[in-house]
Amino acid sequence: MGSLFRSEEMALCQLFLQSEAAYACVSELGELGLVQFRDLNPDVNAFQRKFVNEVRRCDEMERKLRYLEKEIKKDEIPMLDTGESPEAPQPREMIDLEATFEKLENELREVNQNAEALKRNFLELTELKHILRKTQVFFDEQEGGVNQTTESMTRALITDEARTAGASMGPVQLGFVAGVILRERLPAFERMLWRACRGNVFLRQAMIETPLEDPTNGDQVHKSVFIIFFQGDQLKTRVKKICEGFRATLYPCPEAPADRREMAMGVMTRIEDLNTVLGQTQDHRHRVLVAAAKNLKNWFVKVRKIKAIYHTLNLFNLDVTQKCLIAECWVPLLDIETIQLALRRGTERSGSSVPPILNRMQTFENPPTYNRTNKFTKAFQALIDAYGVASYREMNPAPYTIITFPFLFAVMFGDLGHGAIMALFGLWMIRKEKGLAAQKTDNEIWNIFFGGRYIIFLMGVFSMYTGLIYNDIFSKSLNIFGSHWHMSYNKSTVMENKFLQLSPKGDYEGAPYPFGMDPIWQVAGANKIIFHNAYKMKISIIFGVIHMIFGVVMSWHNHTYFRNRISLLYEFIPQLVFLLLLFFYMVLLMFIKWIKFAATNEKPYSEACAPSILITFIDMVLFNTPKPAPEKCEIYMFTGQHFIQVLFVLVAVGCIPVMLLAKPILIMQARKQANEEVQPIAGATSDAETGGVSNGGGHGGGGGHEEEEELSEIFIHQSIHTIEYVLGSVSHTASYLRLWALSLAHAQLAEVLWTMVLSIGLKQEGPIGGIVLTCVFAFWAILTVGILVLMEGLSAFLHTLRLHWVEFQSKFYKGQGYAFQPFSFDAIIENGSASAEE
């Protein structure tokens, strides 16, 4: 239980390991996860350390595994995850692992290269098939009515002079090129051809209906077939350059129909053969990846453990003989025997005959803070550590937060229905936590919800309790025991008077409702909010003052444990007296008012004679005399109230200079007394001794100046601390009014949703009313979960967090420590990192 309320006692130890046994011993310590190693080579470059080559080999193995993982995920092959963590392999097993990974990578790369080459060949044959098929239409037109087509193209592409000059030489022959281009580049390609060739080319194009697979990245691309007619070698060269610039692929296309048919048949045959070879290649690749997927998780764990071990060994020092490794580490004092057993196991595994040596060292360094947690307390400890890691052996607020956090949240979120929704959600995550934890996801919001599942469940349960106290379920009440108010008005009076109020004289039985609020207040008129405000405002102040007093009492435990007698007498006692005499006295006045004054008209104990607590407290602090009370009413609640209030204020004000001056003055006197005790012995008469005294006195003067600077810092720190506490007592007490404000806002929002949304469906009648009610209920449920449970829940959570961090923990919690980060394989693997430093 000690580590629950305070951090574990830590010890700085020196560890001596034989070189042959160091790997196995560190492996055992990594499985244990209870040792934080220190870097004994801070000035040595990472590339100059002893085991840098082994770390590089692990990096290379990890790179190969990531490549395999990428290929496995690309084929959507499930990876086997048994949830077990294999032990770290021995150093000699690294060679076998490297050979296995090298063989798999080479085989997979070779298969991928072959598959890519085959796919590229298949793409070229497919494009050629489409070219032969699409361009056949153009040539069929030439065979059917080619005279007209050829003559029109010839007239378009050949000038009159060239036609006249070539008439004696025979018919003019047009050249052409055919190819494939990406569909989105076709418009720009056509414009460039027209401008570069000055309109002396003829372009025909047709789309390929089915998308083609890019062999490089596997994406689906859309392409088009084109054929360009031109005359002359000069235009041919120009057209080919333009095609090259637009990355269009040109293919040979015979002019003769018989040659085209023969080529098409050959292309189809080759495509069928390629399909067969591609299928066999993909099957072989799939078999290789399936075999690798079965062991990939275990391989990752093994490589990361090896790498973590060598990272840790790089933190060690070598002795002079190079046969022993020396390490320094922080360990929990209670676990030293467990660590020694683990070291013995590692020595036995390695076959070494020299046992390891673990020596505890004396140190003045501040040890790390280590709080043992389980799956229940882990989330609450995380809330505390988010503000700041506790100083070493400082009181840990986490165990108290387990109760106070969900309770203060529930005061703001009190609703039986909304609390049930939250509790059921938390309970579902708790029941399914093993399966949900195995589904490792990168969704940050879900990880936050799942990590705080126990907090959510407790917040929901506490909200159900406060919802019963408020008698509030979705802005309605549960009339279990029957209301203790009986209305004496008739129906017409109630219907005609919108702001009608209940009369405590004639309508109230005089006995309170057995549990929680009377259900009549949910249907009360104008005084409903007034009554709820008065009740919730007072309980907010009561809970706030008790919470702050508890925080001050926690500081007493810190002062007692650290034997800080000055802080105990001159900080804790004045702080507690100041808080009790002013603010706890105000809380007592509330209880006195509730007990002494009743909802009757019998003076002087009637509701009309009850004084205002706020006005009474202001008059008390300002030493004002209360205003005259109404007839037959008393000014004070009890005899001697004025004298007691004046005494309390004087004593509370007197505590301020004690908090401000006592501690610095006592520290100054203690230092002065310490300086006097180290003065030289009186009666020394030699010149040497006299000179020594004189020099010592001069040095002492310099030391006194340094002490003055330190004392000035103490004065400044104490002044800030005192001002912060005195002013904070007022502001922190007012800050707890957020409990009242958010509770009121939550209740009003729930009432708005009920009256303006759900009541519309409840008022509908007949068959149509059922349909309307179903739709309205669905809309109301979405708004209830989205706004009142999620948004209002998040708001109440943040306000509760602030009350704990600022109002509660500021009374005793410094949070200036640093976390204990042991060398643990579980943490390294969970974070997906092979760095032992993390």
Image (cartoon, helix red, strand yellow):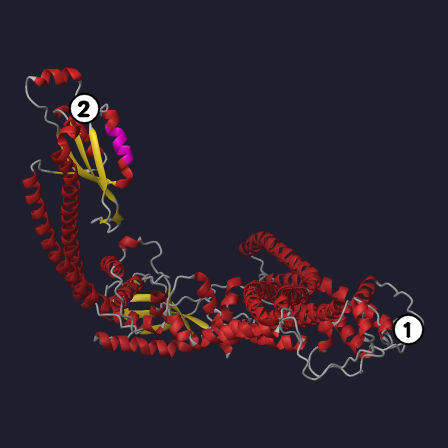
Q: Amino acid at mark 2?
A: Leu
Task: Point out which mark residue 157 bears.
Answer: 2
Q: Residue at x 31, y 53 (%)?
A: 45
Give coordinates of residue 800: x percent, y percent: 60, 66
Q: Mark 1, residues whose alpha carbon is within 10 Å: few (<14), some, or many (≥20)?
A: some
The front one of 74 and 363 is 74
Q: Is residue 373 visible?
A: no
Q: Is residue 309 visible?
A: yes
Query: Quick check: 796 left or right of 429?
Result: right
Give coordinates of residue 377: x percent, y percent: 49, 74
Q: Amino acid at mark 1?
A: Cys
Q: Quadrant of residue 207?
A: top left
Task: Point out which mark residue 633 bears.
Answer: 1
Identify the element where label 2 is drawn.
helix
Q: Quadrant of residue 632?
A: bottom right
Q: In the figure, 284 relative to 118: above or below? A: below
Q: Residue at x 17, y 17 (%)?
A: 160
Question: Where are the magenta residues, as a range?
Answer: 187-193
Q: In the figure, 716 relative to 643: above or below? A: above
Give coordinates of residue 40: x percent, y percent: 35, 60
Identify the element where label 1 is drawn.
loop
Magenta stretch, main secondary structure, is: helix
CA gap between label 2 and label 1 equals: 118 Å
The front one of 333 and 746 is 746
Query: Quick check: 267 left or right of 295?
Result: left
The front one of 338 and 464 is 464
Q: Quadrant of residue 810?
A: bottom right
Task: Point out which mark residue 692 bears.
Answer: none
Give coordinates of residue 158: x percent, y percent: 16, 21
Q: Does 59 appear in magenta? A: no
Q: Mark 2, residues whose alpha carbon is within 10 Å: few (<14), some, or many (≥20)?
A: some
